[in-house]
Image (cartoon, rainbow, N blue to C red):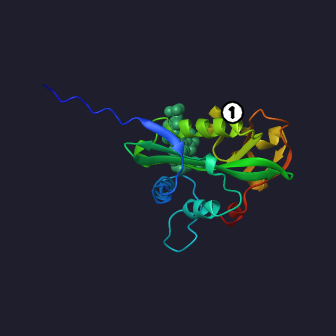
Amino acid sequence: MRPSPVPPAPVVIRQERAGDADEIGAVVAAAFSLAEHSAPPTRPGGPPGEVDLLVALRADTGWLPGLSLIACADGQVVGHVVCTRAHVDGVRALGLGPLSVRPNRQGEGIGGALVRAVLDQAAEAGESLVALLGDPAYYGRFGFVPARQVGVESPDPAWGDFFQARSLGSGDTPTGRFDYAAPFSSV
Ligand SMILES: CC(C)(COP(=O)(O)OP(=O)(O)OC[C@H]1O[C@@H](n2cnc3c(N)ncnc32)[C@H](O)[C@@H]1OP(=O)(O)O)[C@@H](O)C(=O)NCCC(=O)NCCS
């Protein structure tokens, strides 16, 4: 009898908990080391800048523990997404990212499941708008559009249509200049 292939372990999405940070950092490092675009290391020979960005965000007032989600399979972290406090013309909004999936688990829908889960959580929390810097070919499927189409001005005009936004349906969608949580300005 031929051995049957072992089905992949089911993926569970849950909030980040104390003790998860190191494993998340390893997934972020692995994902962004192979990514087409990544932030430069903050120290010579260090991991991609997204790793230290996440450490700085956790220590920042913009950190929202309920919006840091991990994907777990077989007890191991295979993906992570976070939204942090941002502002649009002084009004509360969210910045999404970094988003990371362990390279050997990419293309299985884990990134998509994390994005949908964090958007659902944010909407449930009464948030009105999420913005991010990323590839429109990826984020368009989740309802993101170039931010300027909805009156949200990018922190850096050079980002063009890669700076995207999505309304969450709660209250009026703010318009004006978007400001990420402070640690983003050092990447
Ligand atoms: C981007 C990323 C999170 C996607 O996670 P994933 O689990 O592989 O995504 P999913 O399985 O949900 O979706 C796969 C689909 O997204 C597409 N996709 C993945 N990355 C993409 C990108 N940068 N641009 C356009 N499409 C992309 C794949 O081609 C695939 O398309 P298909 O559904 O038409 O086959 C993952 O590739 C990753 O960690 N990349 C490195 C870090 C990174 O770039 N993060 C995003 C920064 S904005």
- Residue 91 location (% of width, % of height): 84, 49
- Residue 43 location (% of width, % of height): 55, 73
Quadrant hosting residue 164:
top right
Closest to the observer: 147 or 17?
Answer: 17
Residue sitting at x 63%, y 32%: 141
Residue sitting at x 59%, y 59%: 54
For residue 53, say whether it is visible. yes
Task: Examine the rendered structure and indicate whether residue 7 appears above or below residue 103.
Answer: above
Q: Name the residue type under label 1.
A: Gly
- Residue 67 location (% of width, % of height): 63, 46
* Residue placed furthest toward the top: 1
For residue 138, say whether it is visible. no
Quadrant hosting residue 118:
top right
* Residue placed furthest toward the left: 1
Residue sitting at x 74%, y 35%: 168
Image side of residue 39 versus residue 170, left or right: left
Closest to the observer: 101 or 126?
Answer: 126
Name the residue that disc number 1 marks. 143
